[in-house]
Amino acid sequence: MRFIALFNLKESADQSKIAEVVNRRADFDHPVQLVEEFYTPNRAPAVIAVYETEDANQLVLNSLAWMDAFDIQVIPVVGWQEGLDTLRQ
């Protein structure tokens, strides 16, 4: 399954925390397959990540690593063709 994760910076995250998080993310070994990741100039969402996994529980482990700096929302998604086919049925 594919998931989108929206990483919203916590209000308490100052510039030094943001710098720390950027360095941690560069070396982070994701417990799920990271398909793509986007950074925005916003605090919410600051990061948009696309993951693939058959074990959604691994997404919890992935999120726990970032709870000090982000509020994270994980949303299951499907591609447009699969979504269109599902809606037609």
Image (tube, rainbow, N blue to C red):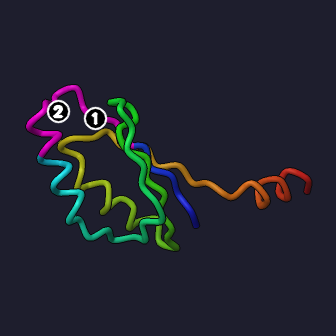
- Which residue is drawn at the image coordinates 43% and 43% (left, top)? 6
Part of the protein shown in magenta? 7-19
Side (left or right) of 48 relative to 31: right
10, above or below 32, in the image: above
Of all residues, the one furthest to the left in this rendering is: 16
Q: Is residue 80 left or right of residue 2?
A: right
Q: Is residue 65 above or below residue 57?
A: above
Residue 39: image quadrant is: top left
Q: Quadrant for the C terminus, please.
A: bottom right
Q: Quadrant of the N terminus?
A: bottom right
Please state which of residues 46 and 67 is positioned toward the viewer in this rendering: 46
The residue under the point 21% across, 41% down is 69
Residue type, numbered disc 2: Ala
Q: Is residue 1 magenta?
A: no
> Which amino acid, mark 1?
Leu
Asked which secondary structure carries label 2, the reply is loop
Residue in the picture at 42% in, 49% down? 38
Direction right: furthest residue: 88
Q: Secondary structure at mark 1?
A: strand
**Which labelled disc corresponds to residue 13?**
2
Residue 87 sits above or below residue 42 on the image: below
In the rendered structure, the answer to whether residue 81 lies left or right of residue 51 reads right
Could you tell me if the residues under marks 2 and 1 are in contact, i.e. CB atoms within 8 Å? yes
The quarter holding residue 73 reads top left
Q: Residue at x 52, y 57 (%)?
A: 3
What is the x, y in percent for residue 17? 12, 39
Q: CA distance from mark 2 to mark 1?
A: 6 Å
Place of residue 16 in the rendered image (x, y in percent of width and height, measured from the top left)? 8, 37
Report the label total: 2
Tell me where residue 64 appears, x and y as whole percent: 26, 55
